[in-house]
Amino acid sequence: MNTKTLKELKTKDDIRDLMARYVRHADNKEWEKLAGLFVPDGTFTPLNVEGLPILTMVGRDQIFQTIWESVGNATAIHHLFSYEVDIQSDDHVNGVFAMEDYLIRPEDQQAHEKPDAGEQQFKSMHGFGHYHVEFIKVDGEWSIAGLVQTRIKLDFTY
């Protein structure tokens, strides 16, 4: 195996590890650690099933605050499945990760964020889709520059 191949395998392994940390931090409600996986001005854009942006969070503080407010004390379960890693350069990688997530709110609790007038708060959400991620290497460490979460299906209970 040549040096280039070993370097590519190491990069792919580093990216898989980074995304594993992302879902572990999400499941453990470690929102500051999750936000810390992004570059300081990183972006996170979840889309709805129709492919339209729900919002775009910019920067670690907004990512932390928005996720904390929307998830609250819900039990969060995230799974990553198949993935594609496309190495653009030594410090730039794009990836697509099939994902599934499940949020279950405690019976007596809601999200920290209040729903808009007329909007009903869900008890559970089960979603399927993909993370489309741009990674950059800064000071020898991989970070998330941008993450777009697409949705194939979302099921809610109320």
Image (spheres, helix red, strand yellow):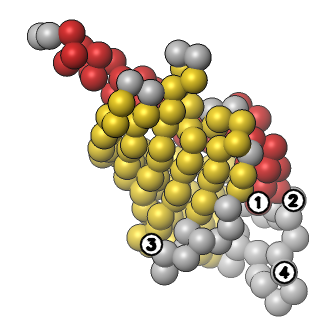
Name the amino acid type tagged 2: His
Per the image, label 2 sits on a secondary structure element best described as loop
Q: Position of residue 43 (x, y in %)?
A: 64, 50
Q: Earlier in the sequence, mark 3 or mark 4?
A: 4
| Residue corresponding to mark 2 | 112
Residue 91 visible in image: yes
Asked which quadrant contains residue 130, the reply is: bottom left
Q: Which residue is mark 1?
A: 70
Sequence-first tag of 1 and 2 = 1
Circle 1/circle 2 CB separation < 8 Å = yes
The tag earlier along the polypeptide, 4 or 1, is: 1
Alpha-carbon distance for marks 3 and 4?
A: 23 Å
Residue under label 4, please give it: 116
C-alpha gap between disc 2 and disc 4: 13 Å
Mark 3 belongs to which amino acid? Answer: Lys
Residue depicted at x 43% and y 62%: 129
- Residue 74, image x, y percentages: 72, 54
- Examine the rendered structure and indicate whether residue 110 appears above or below residue 79: below
Is 103 displayed left or right of 137 in the figure? right
Circle 4 packing at 10 Å, graded few (<14), some (14-19), many (20+), is few
> Which quarter shows the N terminus?
top left
Sequence order check, earlier mark of 3 and 1: 1
Compared to residue 120, the image places residue 95 above or below, namely above
Residue identified by numbered label 3: 153
Any part of residue 67 in sight = no
Label 1 to label 2, Cα distance in Å?
A: 6 Å
